Amino acid sequence: MPVNIIAPYLLTALLPGPRRLVYLSSSSHFGGHSSLAGIDWRGERAGSYSDSKLFVTALAAAVARLRPGMLSNAVDPGWVPTKMGGPGAPEDLELGHRTQEWLATSEEPQALTTGGYWYHRQRRQPHRAVHDEAFQDRLLQTLAEETGTAL
């Protein structure tokens, strides 16, 4: 939780006005639960990777909703061969970062959209909780309380 959601939340809250934000999600977010009860935000005990990726994907959607002048998107780089992904990961490491780079720098109309969940430059439908505004608001309130920093 500290790396996958607390850090992106704090950077978002504390950075003065970037034009574009790209959050690192995962297809694992589909296995996440939208309950915020019992979450160890400080990481003193193992948390759910899937939950953390659902939370950061919802954060991207919340920022898109609440900061209309800013482009905010979440990206699934795929299961790529990294230290975490392992040498047997089936996807191309090179393709893993291309969507992030494209969303951060491209002037193509499709890259200038906000609130999306992307995989290999294709917008996909995320977990149903991602665009649930009540869940987004609960998540942001919880993160503000945990960090002492409001978005």
Image (cartoon, rainbow, N blue to C red):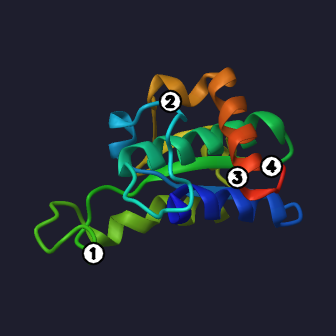
Among the two numbered marks 2 and 4 on one chain, the one whose residue lies closer to the N terminus: 2
Residue at mark 1 to residue at mark 4: CA–CA distance:
30 Å
From the viewer's perspective, is the residue at label 1 or at label 4 nearer? 1
Query: Dots 3 and 1: beta carbons under 8 Å?
Result: no
- In this figure, which residue is indicated by the disc labeled 3? 146
Among the two numbered marks 3 and 2 on one chain, the one whose residue lies closer to the N terminus: 2
Among the two numbered marks 4 and 3 on one chain, the one whose residue lies closer to the N terminus: 4
Residue at mark 3 to residue at mark 1: CA–CA distance:
31 Å
> At label 3, which amino acid type do we have?
Glu
Among the two numbered marks 3 and 1 on one chain, the one whose residue lies closer to the N terminus: 1
* Residue 13: image location, x then y, percent: 80, 57
Residue 82 in the figure: left or right of residue 119: left
Residue 80 in the figure: left or right of residue 50: left
Residue lying at the far left in this picture: please name it: 88
Is label 1 in a helix, a strand or a loop? loop
- In this figure, which residue is indicated by the disc labeled 4? 70
> At label 4, which amino acid type do we have?
Met
Q: Residues within 10 Å of mark 2 (few under 14, many from 20)?
A: few
Residue 72 versus residue 102 in the image, above or below:
above
Q: Residues within 10 Å of mark 4 (few under 14, many from 20)?
A: some
Q: Which mark is residue 35?
A: 2
From the viewer's perspective, is the residue at label 3 or at label 1 nearer? 3
Is label 2 in a helix, a strand or a loop? loop
- In this figure, which residue is indicated by the disc labeled 1? 82
Q: As rendered, which of 144 and 136 lies closer to the eye? A: 144
